Image (tube, grey):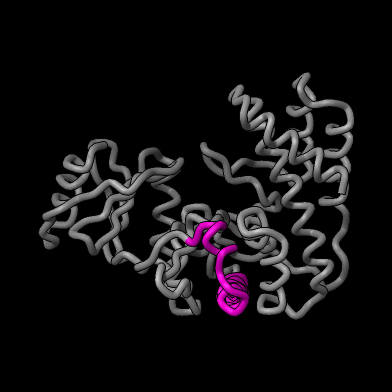
Amino acid sequence: MDAETAGRFIQEAVPDLHVETVVFEGEGDFCRAYTVNDTWMFRLAHNNEATRSLQCETAVLPQLAPTLPLPIPRIEYSGFIGRNRLAFVGYRKIPGEVLAPAALAALDDATQERCARDLGGFLQQLHAFPAEQARQAGVVDSEYPFSRTESGISEGTAAEQYAQALAQLAQYAQVDAATRAYCARLVDDLLAPQPAGALPPALVHGDLSAEHVLSDPATRQITGVIDFTDVLITDPLLDVMYLYANYGPAFVARLLPHYHAGDAAAILARVRLLYAWYTALRLLWALDHDYAPGIELRGRQLAELRGQ
């Protein structure tokens, strides 16, 4: 959908908003995003699963936003557009630019510490949000942290879904015996009973990658967190894992004292397991799509992880 068409749909759906300018900002698996009048962000679903996700955001974010120490989208407009009645949401843009990994790494020590403190406090409050309240808003439970897929939330127990992914990996000749054995050990470790005091399932952002963390380009102070399309109730360390994957282990080690008072070493060990399995899933995606650069990259990363 081009910007002009999107603007026409938005104007019809929100008649009290005089649409003057519309700029296409990009799209993901579920939504296309447009800036309207330089002030508003509108996200338009492009399939039925995206509609379900946006309806969930519309229900949970107004309850969640007041509890968090960093800004998140505060939805002011929502509804359905087009012949297929797909959902949309609109909210005032959160200022800032994506806090890219290279930009974070270039910051001085004190500024990195501030970013770690702010994100750690954000995650602490996000994961403390009452799970039952999130369920009533339509957020789904899944004991398998990686159940969110391009087509929706996959079903089955964690053991079933780990086993399915292992079987799929084993079908490819590019996955050697050492890698298959390593992935099987990862699954055994991830499914092993967690020690007393382990974090219970919680509401998670679900895709806390660098592109969803905004900061002031002048001060590099974090200005907000966006895109809650993948919210889920699952292992809360999934969110920490995404920060680990994007910003690295040193930054996560800084963050953990601001996130949880428990055993930091145990938390970091589980985050590493989740990251290794996440890498295996990225390899599987590349194999399924015959994406040679991804196969080479993820295979190399798994070999490095196996050797650690």
Residue at the extreme top of the image, as rendered: 173
Where's the N terminus, which quadrant?
top left
Give the residue displayed 16% in from the left and 42% down from the top: 4
Residue 147: x and y in percent read 63, 45
Q: Quadrant of residue 257?
A: bottom right
Magenta stretch: dominant SS? Answer: helix
Give the residue displayed 61% in from the left and 70% down from the top: 127
- Closer to us: 274 or 80: 274
Which residues lie in the magenta part?
Answer: 99-128
Q: Is residue 104 magenta?
A: yes
Q: Quadrant of residue 294?
A: top right
Residue 89: x and y in percent read 32, 56
| Count of numbered circles on the image | 0
Q: Is 301 displayed left or right of 246 in the figure?
A: right
Give the residue displayed 73% in from the left and 39% down from the top: 280
Give the residue displayed 40% in from the left and 62% down from the top: 97
Residue 84: x and y in percent read 29, 37
Q: Is 233 displayed left or right of 273 in the figure?
A: left
- Closer to us: 36 or 246: 246
Q: Is 140 displayed left or right of 54 in the figure?
A: right
Q: Is residue 145 magenta?
A: no
- Closer to us: 206 or 174: 174
Q: Is residue 129 visible?
A: no
Q: Is residue 260 visible?
A: yes
Q: Is 186 displayed left or right of 200 in the figure?
A: right
Residue 199: x and y in percent read 75, 69
* For residue 193, above or below residue 51: below
* For residue 122, above or below residue 27: below
- Closer to us: 303 or 69: 303
